[in-house]
Image: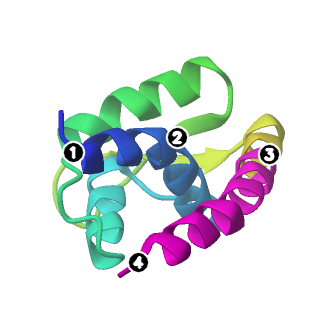
Amino acid sequence: MSLRSQLLKGTLEGCILSLINQQPTYGYELSLRLQEHGLTDVSEGSIYPILLRLQKEKLVVGTLKKSPSGPKRKYYQLTDAGTKALNEFIQQWNSIKPPVDRIIEKGEM
């Protein structure tokens, strides 16, 4: 597993929670939105297991809705626990990002 994959694995759940918080969304749409933000190496195959886990942990709830084309889609939205988990992720991310940035900036040549 590449270093990028390992770093991404640790932050992908928070990114997914944040995107769902912005608007209810379905799995394939999540994949597209992650790609729009530059996470082009995230496949649908890695998103759906995370969505299943988030649903089991009651951080998101999925609702089947009619699709303008094709079968119904499961749209996910955050629960109250999901909002709390997202806020905790943001707090943790904001606490780790500045020191990591400082360390990297000092080491740049």
Tell me residue 56's x, y (percent).
Answer: 57, 17
Alpha carbons under labels 1 and 3: distance apart: 25 Å
- Indicate yes or no whether the magenta region holds residue 103: yes
Query: In the image, which is nearer the foreground, mark 2 or mark 4?
Result: 4
Q: Which residue is mark 4?
A: 108
Left or right of 78 on screen, residue 23: left
Instruction: Determine whether 48 is above or below 99 in the image.
Output: above
Of circles 1 and 2, the one toward us is 1
Mark 4 neighbour class, 10 Å CA radius: few under 14, some 14 to 19, many 20 or more: few
Q: Earlier in the sequence, mark 3 or mark 2?
A: 2
Foreground: disc 4 or disc 1: 4
The image quadrant of residue 85 is: top right
Of the numbered discs 4 and 1, the one sitting upstream in the chain is: 1
The CA distance from mark 2 to mark 4 is 47 Å
Q: Earlier in the sequence, mark 1 or mark 2?
A: 1
| Span shown in magenta | 87-109
Amino acid identity at mark 2? Thr
**How far apart are labels 3 and 2 at the CA level?**
25 Å
Crowdedness near tag 2: few (<14), some (14–19) or many (≥20) residues, C-alpha within 10 Å: some
- What amino acid type should be assigned to the residue bearing mark 1? Glu
The residue singled out by tag 3 in the image is 88
